[in-house]
Image (cartoon, rainbow, N blue to C red):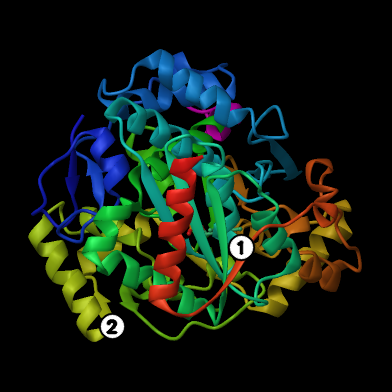
Amino acid sequence: MRYLSTRGVAPTLGFEDVLLTGLARDGGLYLPESWPRLDLNALTGLDYPELATQVMLPFLGGRIAERDLRRLVGEACGTFSHRAIAPLRQIDGRTWVLELFHGPTLAFKDVALQLLGRLYDHVLAERAQRVTIVGATSGDTGSAAIEACRDRSRIDIFILHPEGRVSEVQRRQMTTVLSPNVHNIAIRGSFDDCQELVKAMFADSRFRDEMRLAAVNSINWARIMAQIVYYVAAALALGAPRRRVAFAVPTGNFGNVYAGYAARAMGLPVERLIVGSNRNDILTRFIESGTMEIGEVHPTLSPSMDIQVSSNAERLLFDLCGREGRRLAAAMEALQRTGRLALDAEQHGRLRSLFSGHRLSDSETLAAMASLHGETGELIDPHSAIGLAAARAVALDRDIAVVALATAHPAKFPEAVERATGRRPALPPALADLHARPERFTILPKDLATVQAHIRTELARGEAA
Ligand SMILES: *Cc1c(COP(=O)(O)O)cnc(C)c1O
């Protein structure tokens, strides 16, 4: 199995190189040259770890042995607090919620990142290499990356967050991880300052090479690969291939819903993919109008979806451009230059034949949370509420099972849940003592040289230990 870049210029790579590289050198995203075919009958009845092993194995192209993959998957699944990993809960006659939030940081990113950290460590050990992961967070993704990398022997991770501007729970989920390879830095500045510092460190090629900098960002192919599994698991549990399914996905960077698209390309009977968005609705507008137009980012109650550029959408656009890298590269260049990308009628028709979009304002999101609570007594977080409302809004044949992906535990967004329902969700048992745990982090000014010097010193100290 080889991987090609969506922009068509970078060389094709094998799985391990795609894992470690992330973004292709021509600015594109990596995709498998062809889709492996799912044998749904052979996969029926497997438990989640074995299903994951079988679904992902063809993507590795023999570069990682099956028994090693099975062990890494088993360890990643072992960090989840629910034995089913991604349990399904029926809400009404045709709607199910797929709970993807039973991982260590209570959000769906754990499903992929717990495996990604272990795959990194495995490949780096074989190559006798180390990496230093550097990232900026506005609160949510930092903890998932830290949990994925903690105690991995060949990774150091430095996460920058804006001092005093992330919630207490978000900060503590990062700073109470005391593993020696985890380094939290609170920057005296904004999230944008943090992001600027990270960008500047990657742009400093001497520093980048010396520290062997790497990123675990949402465009990494291995994250998509790991997310394909729960689409297959849910569809099989609901009776596929005899029964057709649709998925509704609260969407930001398009990584999650793209994994559903990939599962369909592999032969899963996915009838429709429903993209849920908040006020930052670039994708729902794109599906409705065929034109992608970049606007301003507005803060909402579902902050993990507050984005204007959905980087993973490039993988879908590549298919809409007939898998021609040059044509896609020209479209992306125009989007960058003019803030606008328009599909032709044929491309738009293909997009609409599979995707629907649905957007919710903050008040509609609160109403969806309140109405589920009134109906069933259950609490749901604002992101998941957008997925569920989208699932219910789109008209489908009555025999189709609709699965709404729940991407965060309600306790991750307690203020919004309380505002909608009057009830404050409790942290699950594994995190119940979070507020009593000791923290460790370093406060630094928003100064590149100071941050670089700190990283150098910390790494040298780690080598000496
Ligand atoms: C990251 C995230 C999303 C958006 O997922 P994408 O793959 O970026 O579309 C939705 N909900 C939650 C809770 C998230 O953390």
Q: Secondary structure at mark 1?
A: helix
Q: What's the mark number on residue 384? A: none
The front one of 305 and 441 is: 441
Measuring from the top left, give residue 404's x and y in whole percent: 61, 50
Magenta stretch, residue numbers: 234-243
Which residue, given by chain and number where applicable, does mark 1 sit on? 393
At x 48% / y 51%, what residue is drawn? 157
Residue at coordinates 79% horizontally, 41% vertically from top-left? Answer: 430
For disc 2, the marked residue is 339
Q: Left or right: where does residue 237 sit relative to residue 219?
A: right
* Magenta stretch, overall SS: loop
> The residue under label 1 is which amino acid type?
Ala
First in sequence: mark 1 vs mark 2? 2
| Residue 320, position as x, y percentages in the image | 22, 58
Res 266 → quadrant? top left
- Secondary structure beneath disc 2? loop
Q: Residue 369, percent across and down? A: 77, 64
Q: Is residue 216 visible?
A: no
